[in-house]
Image (spheres, rainbow, N blue to C red):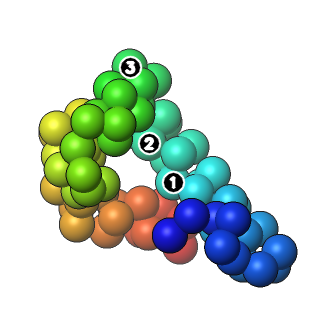
């Protein structure tokens, strides 16, 4: 869902969550893979496929590891 469709408070929370996930990706996988992920997001219709291809980890595993890192 585009952030522009969210209320101000919802958008702030969505940006904070996105920033947290992005910082985790950079720390864990490096900027090169994150750059590849951004390129793949433009090519593939869903986030899970892009993550699988660029980070070499399933979306489910990425989310599990990221959530664990913020606990």
Give the total of numbered labels. 3
Mark 1, residue position: 21
SS for callout 2: helix
The answer to whether residue 33 is visible is no
Q: Is residue 37 above or below residue 48?
A: above
Q: CA distance from mark 2 to mark 3?
A: 10 Å
Sort mark 1 into few (<14), some (14-19) or many (20+) by Cα contacts within 10 Å: some
For disc 3, the marked residue is 32
C-beta proximity under 8 Å, tags 1 and 2: yes
Identify which residue is drawn at 42% across, 68% down: 68
Q: Secondary structure at mark 1?
A: helix
Residue lying furthest right: 8
Query: In this rendering, is residue 47 above or below 70?
Result: above
The residue indicated by pointer 2 is: 25
Q: Where, by quadrant of the figure, is residue 17 drawn?
A: bottom right
Residue 53 image label: none
Mark 1 → mark 2, Cα distance in angstroms: 6 Å
Few, some or many C-alpha atoms within 10 Å of disc 2 (few <14, some 14-19, many ≥20)? some
Q: Position of residue 58 (x, y in %)?
A: 17, 55
Residue 28: where, in percent of width, then height?
Answer: 40, 39
Q: Which residue is farthest front?
A: 5
Q: Residue furthest top?
A: 32
Horizontal side of residue 12 vs 44, given as left or right: right
- Comes first in the chain, label 3 or label 1: 1
Residue 25 falls in image quadrant: top left
Is disc 2 in contact with disc 3, using a CB cutoff of under 8 Å?
Answer: no
Q: Quadrant of residue 5?
A: bottom right
Residue 68 appears anywhere in the view: yes
Residue at position x 77%, y 68% in the image: 12
């Amino acid at each position: 869902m585009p952030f522009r469709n969210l209320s101000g408070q919802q958008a702030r929370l969505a940006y904070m969550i996105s920033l947290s996930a992005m910082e985790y990706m950079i720390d864990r996988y490096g900027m090169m893979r994150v750059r590849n992920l951004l390129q793949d997001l433009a090519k593939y219709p869903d986030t899970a496929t892009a993550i699988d291809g660029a980070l070499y980890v399933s979306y489910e595993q990425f989310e599990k590891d990221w959530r664990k890192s913020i606990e």
